Image (cartoon, rainbow, N blue to C red):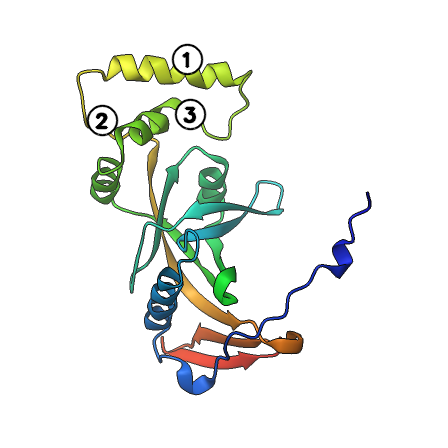
Amino acid sequence: MALNIEHLRQEYALMELKRSDLKADPFQQFETWFEEASSAQVDEPNAMVLSTIDLEGYPTGRVVLLKGFSKDGFVFYTNYESGKGREIALNKKVSLTFLWKEIHRQVRVHGIAQKTSDAQAIKYFQSRPRKSQIGAWTSPQSQVIESRQVLLDNYANVEARFKEKEILPKPANWGGYIVIPRSFEFWQGRPSRLHDRFRYQLDHAGQWVIDRLAP
């Protein structure tokens, strides 16, 4: 059966976004929207698409989970030897995209990714469920493996190795990144595809400037 993809559409009419609604500080605006997404029971509001540039110059994206944000930036954790880790090592310019479909909102953030402190990474790693800690030791993330059995065997070996430990040490190749924003875009879906879009950018004086963008 042919899929009529071109006819899939949804009208966005929940609310509007006016210039007067915006906080002067984009971090405060993000916090407000994140709280509203959580209150609206958006499924995993901390899920975000992390986009990097791969080793051949192609943009590449994957969904990761936001694990903290403040005026310093947006934090996530991963294996430093994964595809994204290798890509960030060569090009620290990244973007984050949040889609909160239930409330017809999207947020994009462009910024620079830097590693968090090892102490911060250790604290978060050891707060995770034990099975997640074992999983981080188990997977040679982004590498080619022969079968799922490789992962199962690795998991069993790690579990045996640390059977006496409730809390595992952090692997040396695992840690956090903080994305320090250079720009934000807040998008609110509107009828007739005339969406509301506002961009925050830092000027040369380090002040946030807000512009409305055409949809």
Residue 32 lies in quadrant: bottom left
> Does 105 sit above or below residue 153?
below
In the image, residue 69 lies at what x, y percent? Answer: 31, 58
> Does 174 sit above or below residue 178?
above
Q: Marks 3 and 2, Cα distance to the nearest angstrom? A: 15 Å
Classify mark 2: helix, strand or loop. Answer: loop
Classify mark 3: helix, strand or loop. Answer: loop
Task: State the residue at coordinates (31%, 17%).
Answer: 158
Classify mark 1: helix, strand or loop. Answer: helix
Split into 4 quadrants, where in the image is the N terminus? top right
Q: Is residue 182 left or right of residue 122?
A: right
Task: State the residue at coordinates (55%, 23%).
Answer: 144
Crowding at mark 2 (Cα within 10 Å: few <14, some 14-19, many 20+): some
Please say whether residue 160 is visible from this viewpoint.
yes
Q: Tell whether label 3 touches label 1 (CB within 8 Å).
A: no
In the image, residue 30 lies at what x, y percent? Answer: 37, 67
Which is more N-terminal, label 3 or label 1? 3
Which is more N-terminal, label 2 or label 1? 1
What residue sits right under mark 2 in the picture?
168
Task: State the residue at coordinates (56%, 72%).
Answer: 189
State the residue in front, 169 or 42. Answer: 42
Crowding at mark 1 (Cα within 10 Å: few <14, some 14-19, many 20+): few
What residue sits right under mark 1 in the picture?
153
Q: Tell whether label 2 touches label 3 (CB within 8 Å).
A: no
Q: Amino acid at mark 1?
A: Asp
Label placed on residue 139 = 3
> Does 52 sit above or below residue 20?
above
